[in-house]
Each structure stands twice: as structure tokens, then as C-alpha cells.
Image (tube, grey):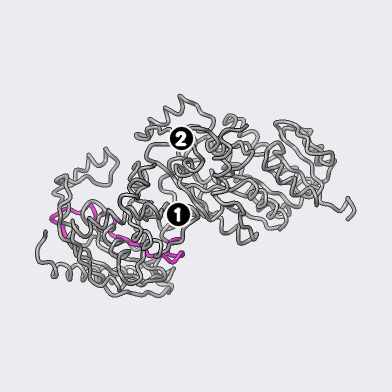
Amino acid sequence: MSLAEFFKRRLVSSELEEQINRIGKPIGSLGYDPWGYNNDTLKIGYAITREIYEKYFRVEVDGIDRIPAEGPVLIIANHSGQLPIDGLLIGFALASRKDRPRIPRAMIERFFPTVPYLGNLLNQFGGVLGDPVNCAKILANDEAVIVFPEGIRGSGKLYRDRYQLKRFGNGFMHLAMKYNATVVPVGVVGCEETIPALANIKPLARLLGLPYFPLAAPVVLPAKVHICVGEPMFFDNDDIPEEQVTARVELVKAAVGEMIKKGLNQRKRIF
Amino acid sequence: MPASKRPQILVTGAAGTLAQEVINQLRETCDIVAVDFREQVWLGDDIPSYCIDFNKRVFEDLFRRFHFDGVIHLGRIMSSQETRLQRYNANVLGTHKLMDLSHKYGVGRLMILSTYHVYGAMPFNPALIDEEAPLKAAGLTMDLVDSVELENLANIYLWRYPDLNITILRPCNIVGPGVRNAISTLLSGERAPVLAGFSPMMQFIHIDDMADAIVRAWQRKKKGIYNVAPDDWVAYQRALELCGCQQVPIPSIPPILPRTILRLLNLKRFPPYLMDFFKYPVIIDGRHFAKEFGFRPKRTLDDIFHYYRENKHPV
């Protein structure tokens, strides 16, 4: 019996199995899709994430039903906390919502595919290498994608810069326009406090081939996480100059900023 | 129909299972001449069969004698076979000669079998690679230069001589009964090496389906470059599991370690220069071909793996 089967038997109830199967995903005959998503591994991941989501981070979600249940969707959120925990929590929030859940994909950093075990595992949970071609094909497949336009600028943020949005790339807007995807701004509050980093040890990061190496306690703190989902935004596919695309990106960035503010107001205490 | 009206086709690589499948499908309607540089194979009294090196002058005599209407070039040396130089001579220089002769003797249809290896395996590959994606293999390893060069040459002929009606097919892993390439050898073995922690997505096409694809492409005169792959995917280690192969993990980091180990082992079925194909996914998008030629593979991944599982211990 493989490790995956062992975990599946221990963690995945038949009820959960049915729940995930019901959501449905465009997969091949053996449960995989072209990006490495695997239905069986996802079930195990879902069961583990549920514990972390409900008991460790005690996530509170606001407005998750605003994410459309069908068609291409880009979920645009702020990135923080050194590890992609925010992506995991948003993904779970959407996959576990009562009304018409979806299993979104998350665009992941370019160095993950080179990391043994972890790279494959992220792929199996729905993580996809953050390449515009990948995102385009997934949107063409009518799927929902979680994108952090700040990229490593956001996740590698230091504690002193918490909740300050870094520059947003324009790539997501071009894709949203081309594939007529709904843009949903999301603010995540709490992940900044999970791994507060005091400094970035650049030489060590370079040595290890990592995008950054935070000077932080080697634990993930149980901060309470608030996820606030904003109103969906729609953008037409007019032939507009890059300047106007940037202006549209700024609109989305402002909406994400609003959601962060809302989350911070809702938050009563950090832990 | 009188015999003279039947199209006359040259099929290269006749000693291979794929070519023989194609010949079997076409022999009812076409007159076939079979060629292989490895050996002379007997394919029945109606099919003249030769063992000729394309780079030799006698090769031209075949064109003089038979007046081919079409050429199906399946006689590519696979990436895992022979040496780099031999592959270059046969695949690049040999194919060049073949295309030159095809042009000189007015061949109206030329099909060339390439491989998905031309895209190269690297961590930043997106999935569902389109035909117009850059061919990175030559930049990643010298051992795949011949594959990319072959395509470049074919491309030049494709545009310079439109009358040749060149179609280049880039299939994913061809597997099934009789296939002797690296991946098929791996799947049919008792044990197969894996790079610890890496199980890239892969695509497999059954040899009968591939033969169907070639015959379909032959029947419709549409030139161009096409990926050929089914809409189904599986991770390498899961495929091994389903084929009943025991996995032998090779330490994967730092990258120099597996490369050194593989060089020392020098396994034909797992050459060090193809190592990255077992580390990073190279998933191609075959939808363009499927749509243009109305192609739909008939054998599932289950059928394929069932064959390997059941034939572990041949009687």
C-alpha cells in the first residue's frame, strides 16, 4: 500500500470523497489533469487543510459567495507570510463553501518545480507554475485561478512592511481582458503575522537558489486569519495602451487594499 | 482500380513496429516500398524491402526506379539510441538527403516523424505546449541537437517547396507491444529508476493509435507541424506503479549527483541526457492535430498499462 493510500484511508471520509467528486474538474481517466492536479491527493490535502483552516488559523471568511460559480475567474489577492499559506486558505475557503463550491488553481513561484517532493505535491493540490501560458490555458478551460500579482515581492515582505501592497504586475489584467475572466479582489489579513520576518538574508538565499531567506522564528504562528472577498470586477477586451492597462490594475489594487482595510477593521486581536 | 493508379509510397524505418503498423494499414490501398538502414525486413512478396543508408548514392536509385508519390519518414534514430554523431548523420544529413531527393523526383507528400523531445525538459515549461513554442532541447543538451536540427531542416523545405506538402508530427511517448524506445523498455522492466521526489506528468500514445494518426495525416493533404497526444495525463511514478514496476529512487539533488550516477550506470533506457524528461513535465497540446485530422485515440492509458503489467514475464 502506498503512502497516499494510507493517508487516504485514515483521513478521507466517504462523505468528503463524494463532496470533492461532486465539484468536478476537467481531468483525465486516471484522475490527473495536464498541470499535475490529482483528485485523490486533493482529497487528502483537503482533509488536512480543513484541520489547519478551522482549528489553527480559525479562518473567518466574508463574501466568499461573490466568486462566480462558473466561467473563468481570476482571484486577485495580497501575498504575505513567506510561505504560500494564503493561497491554500483562499483555495480551501472556495472549495468548502456551501453553495456551488469550486476548486481553484493557484499560480506558484517559479522555483517550486525544482524542489523535490514539494513541487509535485503543490501540483497535485492544484498549484500551477506561474507562467502566462499556463494561466491562459486554465482560463480557457473555464477554471478559477488564484493570482498574487505582487509575487515574491509580496510573500518575502518583512514584518515592518505588513499590509502595504507592493507593485502589482500587469500580466493578470491582460489575461483577464483576453479571456473575459471575472476579476475578484480578495484581502487576506493575518498571514503577515504567521511568519513575521525581521530581515532577508540575501547571500544565503542566493547560495541556496531561493528567492529570499527570511530571518524569522522557524515556526508558523497561529494568527487568526480573515479573508475578505470584494465585488467582482469586469473588464472589456478593448485595444488599449499599456498605460490604461496599468490604470485598470491600479483599480484592482485599490479594491484589494479596501478588502485588507475591511479585514483589519474586523480583526479584534492578532491571535 | 488498376495497379498503376495506386499511390507509390516509400516508408522508412521499416524494421520498426510503428512503420510495420503503418505499412499494414496502407498496403491495401497503396504500393509500398520499405527501407531501413538497420536491416532488411521481409514484409510480404508485394512489398520490396531494402536495407540502405540514406547517405549512400544507391538511395537515389530507389527514387529513379519507383517514382514515389509520397514518403513517410519514420526512420528517425530515437534519442536514446546510437551515439550523438551517428544520430546527427542519420537524422540530419540523412533526412536532408531524403528531402532533397523527394524534391528532385517530384514527391507530392512528405511526412516526417519527429518527437516531443524537441521542446526540451526544463522546470519552467508550461503545460499543454503548442506547436509554435520554442524548441529548447538543443540549448539544454547537445544530445538532442539532431532532433531540433531535423525539424529546422524540414521547416525550411516546408516553406521553400510547398509542393512537397510536408507534415511534421511531434508525438508524445509512443508505447505498446513491440515498441523498443527508452520509455517502453522502462515500463516493461521489473525495476525502473526514478529521480527521488520528482514524478513529472507524462503522456502516452498507443502504437496502434500512432499508426492511425500517421495514416490519417497521410490521407488528408494538410501540411504543417502538429503535436500528437491524447487528452489524458499521468504522473511518471503512477504509470510505473500501474505497470507493476518497482521504483528504484536515485538521489535527485544537487543535480550533479543523479547525472554522475546515471553516467556511471550508463543505462540505455535512462540516458543521463534524457534525465530531465523524468524530472520536469513536457506536456504537449495535441488538440490542434485532433481537430484538423479528426483524430481520436482508441486505446486508453488503462489499456496501455494493462499490457505492460500482464507482459512482465513473457512465456
Q: What distance separates the C-alpha of mark 2 from that of mark 1?
A: 22 Å
**Circle 1 crowding by C-alpha within 10 Å: few under 14, some 14–19, many from 20:** some
For the point 24% across and 68% down, the residue is: A256
On the image, the x and y values in percent for residue B90 come to 65, 35
Region of the chain picked out in magenta, as a range: A136-164
Left or right: where does residue B216 sit relative to residue A149?
A: right
Q: Amino acid at mark 2?
A: Gln
On the image, the x and y values in percent for residue B108 come to 76, 52
Residue tagged by mark 1? A31
For the point 68% across and 58% down, the residue is: B222
Q: Residue furthest top?
A: B264
Q: Measured along the vertical axis of the image, is residue B216 above or below residue A248? A: above
| Element type at mark 1 | loop
Whether residue B145 is in magenta: the answer is no
Residue tagged by mark 2? B246
On the image, the x and y values in percent for residue B104 come to 77, 45
Q: Amino acid at mark 1?
A: Gly
Residue B130 in sight from this viewpoint: yes
Residue A154 in sight from this viewpoint: no
On the image, the x and y values in percent for residue A75 come to 32, 66
